[in-house]
Image (cartoon, helix red, strand yellow):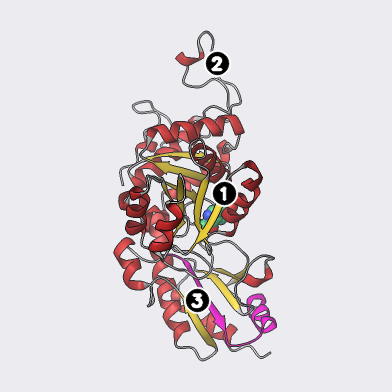
Amino acid sequence: MSDRSMDWNPGIPGPSSPPIYCASVYSSHGDPKHDPYTYGRFGNPTWEALELALGDLEGASAVAFASGQAASLALILSLAESRSRFVLPGDGYFGARSLFAGLASRNLVMELADHKDLTAIGLELSRGPSVLWSESPTNPFLRVFDLKALARKAKEHGAPFIVDNTTATSVLQRPLDLGATATVVSLTKSLSGHSDVILGAVTSRDEDLLTRVRGWRSLGGGIPGPFEAWIAHRGISTVSLRVQRQSENAQEIAEFLLQHDRVSEVYYPGLSPERELASSQMSGGFGPLLSFTLDGTASQAEKMVREGGLFRPATSFGGVHSSWERRARWPGEDAPQNLIRLSVGIEPIADLLAALEAALSLEE
Ligand SMILES: *Cc1c(COP(=O)(O)O)cnc(C)c1O
């Protein structure tokens, strides 16, 4: 990866990595168009270094936001200037569905459809000017959608095609190369990777769309803090190593769980039935996230999560430390009561398998 973002100050002696610009105002006078920076809500060199690094990962341009949700909201508002129907998978990110539900009173319509069912998608897209808003793999069931086929469907109907690429990251999957108009990512997860920052971004090769997205960022104010942008940028320098290790560990864990007699189902894109499709559009691994159902009750699953040793009880995913949670503890989550979602970190695999074996052998 050539990292243009590290050339923030080419030729001038100084720190070899970009500094943090804490500035609400910049020296400027006269016509503001002549100044690269004027007021902190409109631009900051620390965000730009992060955006260059993100853009390089996907061969595109990126716009960073205060969170994945802020990025989604700005993208929705930018797309909604000419269309009001958004077609989402019923099992996509809960926060996205909640965002669209909140926007229903602003004349935005969310339609839920199975993104494996291309006929149903075609039908939804033919009902009026729409946006196809997808995500693959989903969670907690790690379903894989055929992104190329979805892109073709969207194109047939003149619909922008958006992919939430948070779970895979652009290290493992590049939706823009598969036909997506834009991707939205939560940098909070694997991209920053150390569970210490909330941030998000929109990535695209459509400069008109990005101008509108940037416009909503300046107007709505969902801007990244310079420190958060710096932390995420530093994390991105190791993302390919981390995601590769997480994927190797996750694959071994998925296979271990699959043959364990206290486990009834395992969901991972690296296992059948999803592996074949996942391999056709992901490369270098299948990501840190997997789910399984314990052959037991909700309280047995809770106990296991509480006493998981190396597996910390926590939500979210993509950090260097392994964590897990019983998903059904969240209101509105319709996963089975005994389903545990696991985010695999970069610990030695032998330690992780030993911790799992111990947790699975807990008495009630
Ligand atoms: C976490 C997450 C988001 C939202 O990101 P935040 O940074 O929490 O706002 C969006 N999509 C997916 C798939 C996520 O996991």
Of the residues under marks 3 and 1, which one precedes in the sequence?
Answer: 1
Between marks 3 and 1, how big is the CA–CA gap?
44 Å
Residue 194 appears at what percent x and percent y? 53, 56
Task: Tell me which amino acid carries mark 1.
Answer: Val
Camera sees residue 234: yes
In the image, residue 175 lies in the stretch drawn in magenta = no
Camera sees residue 197: no
Residue 300 appears at what percent x and percent y? 67, 84
Task: Tell me which amino acid carries mark 2.
Answer: Ser
The quarter of the image that holds ligand 1 is: bottom right
Residue 203, image quadrant: top left
Find disc 3 in the rendering and name its residue: 352
- The local crowd at label 3, few if under 14, some if 14 to 19, many if 20 or more residues have their Cα within 10 Å, is many
Find disc 2 in the rendering and name its residue: 27
**Residue drawn at 35 percent across, 28 percent down:** 10
- The local crowd at label 1, few if under 14, some if 14 to 19, many if 20 or more residues have their Cα within 10 Å, is some
Between marks 3 and 2, how big is the CA–CA gap?
53 Å
Find disc 1 in the rendering and name its residue: 109
Of the residues under marks 2 and 1, which one precedes in the sequence?
Answer: 2
- The local crowd at label 2, few if under 14, some if 14 to 19, many if 20 or more residues have their Cα within 10 Å, is few
Task: Tell me which amino acid carries mark 3.
Answer: Leu
Please name whichever residue, 167 or 45, is drawn nearer the observer in this view of the structure.
167
Q: Is residue 115 above or below residue 25?
A: below
Residue 276 appears at what percent x and percent y? 32, 72
**Residue segment shown in magenta:** 287-306
Residue 246 appears at what percent x and percent y? 43, 66
